[in-house]
Image (cartoon, coloured by chain):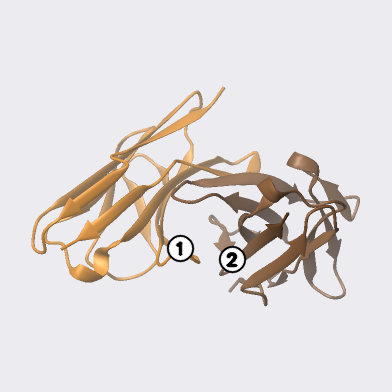
Chain colours: A orange, B brown
Amino acid sequence: SQTIHQWPATLVQPVGSPLSLECTVEGTSNPNLYWYRQAAGRGLQLLFYSVGIGQISSEVPQNLSASRPQDRQFILSSKKLLLSDSGFYLCAWSINLNPEAFFGQGTRLTVV
Amino acid sequence: AQSVAQPEDQVNVAEGNPLTVKCTYSVSGNPYLFWYVQYPNRGLQFLLKYITGDNLVKGSYGFEAEFNKSQTSFHLKKPSALVSDSALYFCAVKGTGRRALTFGSGTRLQVQP
């Protein structure tokens, strides 16, 4: 069966520091991968999605970037964090045969 | 463009009573529609989906949803609510040719004992 791993679960970082959040999927090949951000326990905003290695689409301009160095690995990064980057970050995957997405457990990022 | 509206921030229901969480959508072409549930500090769990076919879709934990094309709605329902159903519920839509789901703002369901 397919599983998705996302880490770390919580992270506290100072303003101006770099960020790297990692997400990996097991049990499937060539998944579509997504990064969402959830602010204040409410709606989800799509940040990035990827349909293949090295292919990244950005939905909103911001202080973050994403990379997909391997088929089942998706990384969210920042060179310098802002206070406004605080939030709950969720990684998800889907496959082309089924439209639903499956989510990781999320990373709670607090920028101080 | 695709969008989802969940008009209620919170729904309160007594345990054992039926519940409905409302969702309306806007999308080009035929929609794929979804419901997810989120417990505190956790990721989203998939409940059910509508792709095509029967307008009444059954999902996990006794939940079901009714697709209404004329009203562009996809309301989540359960005949008898449990206290453990208390959580944040998200409706989502994916339009033809779109790569990602668009989510509503979420509805907090509170089931009182």
Relative to B43, say whether B73 is above or below.
Answer: below
- The quarter of the rendered structure image containing the N terminus of chain B is bottom right
- The chain letter under disc 1 is A
Are callouts 1 and 2 both on one chain? no
Residue at x-position 68% and y-position 54%: B35
Residue at x-position 79% and y-position 64%: B20
The image quarter containing residue A78 is: bottom left
Instruction: From the top left corner, tell me how far across and down residue A2 is, in percent.
Output: 53, 27
Q: Are marks 1 and 2 in contact (CB under 8 Å)?
A: yes
Residue at x-position 32% and y-position 42%: A9
The image quarter containing residue B89 is: bottom right
| Distance between the alpha carbons at the discs numbered 1 and 2 | 9 Å
The image quarter containing residue B108 is: bottom right
Instruction: From the top left corner, tell me how far across and down residue A37 is, in percent.
Output: 39, 60
Identify the residue position indicated by label 2 in the image.
B106
Q: Looking at the picture, tell me which residue is in the foreground, A27 or B47.
A: B47
- The chain letter under disc 2 is B
Q: Amino acid at mark 1?
A: Gly
